[in-house]
Image (tube, helix red, strand yellow):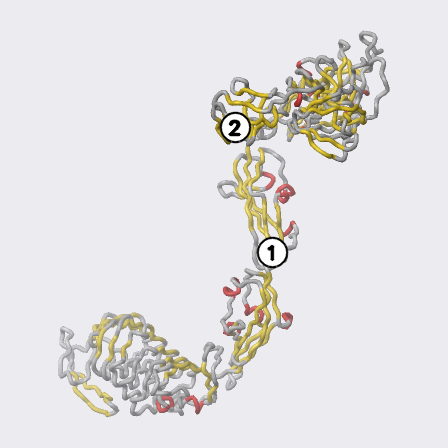
């Protein structure tokens, strides 16, 4: 009879017990009201039980407490040291599971019938490492007649003392997986019916078993023959076994049985027919790029697993295919991610079927580089094309340039809000642009970021006047009306960076602005700097009859349109533009330099926009410089001021100066301007250039032969002309330039040494920067040559310096005494 959940009160129950296979009837004492077991300890024990409700209950067996809730028993830790009959849950068809939460020690015959006859029991969790059977002698019918139970993990059971394992799994119709990896049945006396009667109570669905080397053939003898062979899992998996195959007869003899060696175990499964095919288009090879996420199982076309006894039982086994490298190591997608470029041999296995694949990993050459920081200004035009221009490099995995459509970007403001490209410069602030490629061949997406700062635009443009009227032929250039300009950052902008266009009265563009002043009409001259434009209305009136002031002056001459350079050169001689010699003009004074010749300023002079030297027309001053750094110009034309004074139209050829290339007008007065080249022979000249003077084999100054140091006195044989320059031929036959900035006529003493009158410093540069030594008072130093600071700065005269070993020192007579 069965014992239902609930109190048994004070009644005496007569139970029919099966003890050691012998039918017997015994009187079992009932529990007292306080729950204590009353009766002879030699009799089977009953469980304490307290009825809570139809859905829940609790109680205790031995020292093990339990609770019941909605079909599941929870067994807590404790010890049971005697045979229990009946267990509180026996024959309870509502039980679906057990949860074991603590260590339970089962001694003697306590395990018998513990979980038997539970028709709806589907799972027992927590049994591993919690059920201790090391001192149990009987496991008889422990899981008997549980037809809904699918799997049992008894890997922690120790059964070497068990003598009775009869009918342990009999009637477990759905049992499919059983782990007996530590079972020892060498002491079991009658194990023949462990799995029941083969004819009607066999465990016919048990396809996976883990057995130990101490399980006897008698224990396995009741396992039914389903027609399957058994195969050891070995290095594979249950669904892709790689071990040896055994017949049913061989298997129930336990192929690993060996009671004389330390216990081992092996998992066996029913042998299935396994198939494997790789994708034909791969042709046995696959190429990827380093770092590419590639699952090696993507190469599998099909991998099947079929039960040979029941062919309808078939499924895809791709997930269980084993992939190894040439060394037999497992291959996974995560592993391939870290592989370096090279060729790798992969082996695919599904059971005994294997396929080969050569995997080639190439170097990933993908890249995405963009400008890191970009400065824009409010309302500045910035288009999609401008944004893409900031992409410095975009290549795919093979190193090929990506098409623009394969690179995308997103703009976000400081708050993370997306911003359209057309709205980017509308608001001040900082923006982040994230560039990203499409998915590359490597499977990766490259990204890069750029920071854009949108600042206030400080661009400005100012003209001297909005309109101007001139007479046809009167000198006028667009620069004449330009006053000032600043860029977006507020820095000054030179006129050369201003865009100037013009249209006539009909709106037609004027192609040549340099001739604008020659043709009568009304013109709109537009100046543009950044996004700021200003317009000048220029009215050109017809010229009246010309009047020549003073009677002997030439009419205004337009600037020469071109010039060429002299082939002469020396240690520091600027190259000289040259023009064909001009015919003598009786209206020019005989001292006037011809077009294409070079002149230099011997006093402070100004450069003007037109021949009328007033403050509004002045571009800049050239200060009075030492001879070796005097500002030099090439004459490109002539003009007269409104008062009739002769002017040179010139180009600044001081190539190491910020003024180089500027054009305008300077005085032609000999009080201020002289020819750069000597015109007459002198018997001796002295080198004054700090860098020395080159000497050449030919008068065109080719075939350099030597360099004369500053202070060298040269003897002159004669003077020759070369284009619009002159050369001195020395008595030794060599040629040198006759440039007054490099040589001076006569013999001149040269400072050879100096003595410090007080403590002074030596510097690395002529401008006395980067101090490199302190020199004590009284120290005598050898002088190599003299020079001047700020040599090419025409806003500063410069100061005398002496070049000594290791640098420069002051030339101030207050601090040094010089010797010749």
Q: Give the residue at x 63% y 58%.
A: 398
Q: Is residue 729 left or right of residue 235?
A: right
Residue 148 placed where, x, y %? 38, 79
- In which image quadrant can residue 457 be found? top right
Give the answer, above or below, for where 182 lies relative to 498. below
Comparing 460 with 755, the one in front is 755
Earlier residue among tags 2 and 1: 1
Q: Give the residue at x 53% y 43%.
A: 432
| Residue furthest out toward the top | 550
Give the answer, above or below, for where 39 lies relative to 609. below
Residue density around tag 1, few if under 14, some if 14–19, many if 20 or more, within 10 Å: some
Comparing 213 with 660, the one in front is 660
Q: Is residue 454 visible?
A: yes
- In which image quadrant can residue 765 be found? top right
Residue 98 placed where, x, y %? 31, 74
Q: Is residue 589 left or right of residue 744?
A: right
Q: How many marks?
A: 2
Q: Give the residue at x 84% y 21%.
A: 582
Residue density around tag 2, few if under 14, some if 14–19, many if 20 or more, within 10 Å: many
Give the answer, above or below, for where 32 lies relative to 749. below
Of helix, strand and loop, which one carries label 2? Answer: strand
Comparing 386 with 328, the one in front is 328
Which numbered circle lies on residue 463? none
Q: Which corner quadrant holds the C terminus? A: top right
Residue 318 placed where, x, y %? 53, 73
Comparing 213 with 35, the one in front is 213
Of helix, strand and loop, which one carries label 1? Answer: loop
Q: Which residue is mark 2?
A: 762
Q: Is residue 507 visible?
A: no
| Image depth: mark 2 or mark 1 in front | 2
Q: Which residue is mark 1?
A: 365
């Amino acid at each position: 009879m069965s014992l239902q959940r609930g109190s048994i009160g004070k009644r005496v129950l007569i139970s029919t017990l099966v003890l050691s296979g012998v039918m017997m009837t015994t009187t079992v004492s009932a529990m007292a009201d306080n729950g204590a077991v009353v009766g002879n300890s030699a009799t089977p024990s009953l469980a304490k039980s307290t009825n809570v409700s139809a859905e829940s209950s609790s109680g205790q067996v031995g020292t093990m407490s339990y609770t019941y809730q909605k079909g599941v028993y929870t067994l807590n830790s404790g010890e049971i040291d005697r045979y229990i009959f009946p267990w509180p849950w026996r024959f309870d068809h509502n039980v679906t599971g057990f949860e074991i939460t603590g260590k339970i020690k089962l001694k003697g015959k306590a395990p018998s019938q513990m979980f038997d006859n539970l028709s709806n029991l589907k799972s027992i969790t927590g049994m591993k490492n919690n059920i201790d059977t090391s001192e149990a002698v009987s496991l008889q019918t422990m899981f008997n007649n549980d037809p809904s139970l699918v799997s049992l993990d008894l890997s922690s059971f120790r059964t070497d003392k068990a003598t009775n394992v009869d009918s342990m799994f009999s009637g477990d119709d759905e049992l499919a997986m059983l782990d007996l990896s530590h079972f020892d049945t060498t002491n079991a006396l009658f194990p023949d019916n462990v799995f029941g009667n083969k004819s009607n109570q066999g465990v016919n669905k048990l396809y996976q078993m883990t057995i130990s080397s101490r399980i006897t053939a008698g224990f396995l003898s009741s396992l039914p023959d389903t027609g399957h062979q058994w195969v050891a899992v070995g290095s594979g998996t249950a669904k892709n076994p790689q071990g040896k195959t055994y017949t049913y007869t061989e298997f129930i003899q336990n192929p690993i049985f060996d009671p004389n060696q330390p216990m081992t175990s092996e998992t066996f499964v029913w042998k299935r027919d396994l198939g494997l095919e790789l994708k034909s288009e791969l042709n046995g090879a696959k190429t990827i790029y380093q770092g590419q996420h590639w699952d090696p199982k993507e190469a599998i076309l099909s991998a099947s697993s079929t039960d040979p006894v029941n062919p309808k039982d078939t499924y895809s086994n791709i997930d269980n295919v084993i992939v190894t490298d040439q060394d037999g190591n497992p291959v996974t997608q995560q592993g391939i991610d870290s592989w370096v470029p090279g060729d790798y041999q992969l082996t695919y296995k599904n059971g005994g079927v294997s396929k080969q694949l050569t995997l080639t990993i190439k170097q990933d050459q993908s890249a995405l580089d963009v400008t890191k920081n970009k400065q824009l200004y409010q309302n500045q035009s910035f288009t999609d094309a401008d944004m893409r221009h900031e992409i410095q490099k975009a290549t795919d995995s093979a190193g090929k340039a990506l098409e623009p459509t394969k690179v995308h970007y997103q703009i976000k403001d400081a708050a993370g809000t997306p911003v359209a490209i057309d709205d980017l410069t509308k608001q001040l602030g900082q923006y982040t642009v994230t560039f990203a490629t499409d998915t590359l061949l490597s499977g990766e997406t490259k990204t890069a970021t750029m920071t854009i700062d949108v600042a206030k635009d400080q661009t400005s443009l100012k003209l001297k006047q909005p309109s101007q009227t001139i007479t046809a032929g009167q000198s006028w250039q667009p620069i004449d009306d330009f006053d000032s300009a600043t860029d977006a950052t507020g820095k000054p902008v030179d006129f050369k960076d201003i865009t100037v266009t013009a249209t006539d009265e009909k709106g037609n563009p004027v192609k040549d602005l340099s001739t604008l002043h020659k043709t009568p009409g009304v013109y709109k001259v537009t100046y543009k700097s950044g996004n700021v434009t200003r317009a000048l209305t220029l009215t050109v009136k017809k010229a009246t009859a010309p009047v020549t002031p003073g009677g002997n002056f030439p009419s205004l001459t337009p600037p020469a349109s071109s010039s060429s350079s002299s082939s002469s050169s020396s240690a520091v001689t600027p190259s000289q533009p040259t023009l064909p010699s001009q015919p003598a003009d009786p209206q020019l004074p005989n001292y006037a330099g011809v077009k294409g010749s070079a002149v230099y300023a011997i006093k402070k002079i100004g450069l003007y926009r037109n021949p009328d030297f007033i403050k509004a027309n002045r571009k800049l001053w050239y200060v009075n410089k030492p001879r070796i750094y005097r500002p030099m110009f090439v004459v490109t034309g002539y003009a007269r001021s409104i008062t009739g004074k002769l002017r040179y139209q010139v180009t600044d050829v001081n190539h190491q100066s910020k003024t180089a290339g500027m054009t305008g007008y300077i005085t032609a007065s000999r009080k201020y301007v002289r020819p750069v080249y000597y015109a007459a022979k002198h018997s001796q000249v002295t080198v004054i250039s700090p860098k020395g003077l080159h000497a050449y084999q030919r008068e065109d100054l080719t075939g350099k032969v030597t360099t004369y140091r500053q202070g060298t006195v040269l003897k002159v044989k004669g003077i020759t002309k070369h284009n619009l320059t002159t050369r001195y031929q020395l008595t030794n036959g060599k040629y040198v330039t006759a440039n007054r900035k490099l040589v001076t006529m006569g013999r001149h003493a040269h400072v050879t040494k100096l003595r410090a009158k007080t403590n002074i410093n030596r510097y690395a540069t002529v401008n006395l920067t980067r101090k490199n030594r302190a020199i004590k008072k009284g120290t005598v130093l050898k002088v190599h040559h003299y020079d001047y600071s700020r040599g090419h700065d025409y806003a500063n005269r410069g100061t005398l310096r002496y070049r000594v070993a290791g640098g420069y020192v002051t030339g101030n007579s207050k601090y040094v005494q010089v010797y010749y």
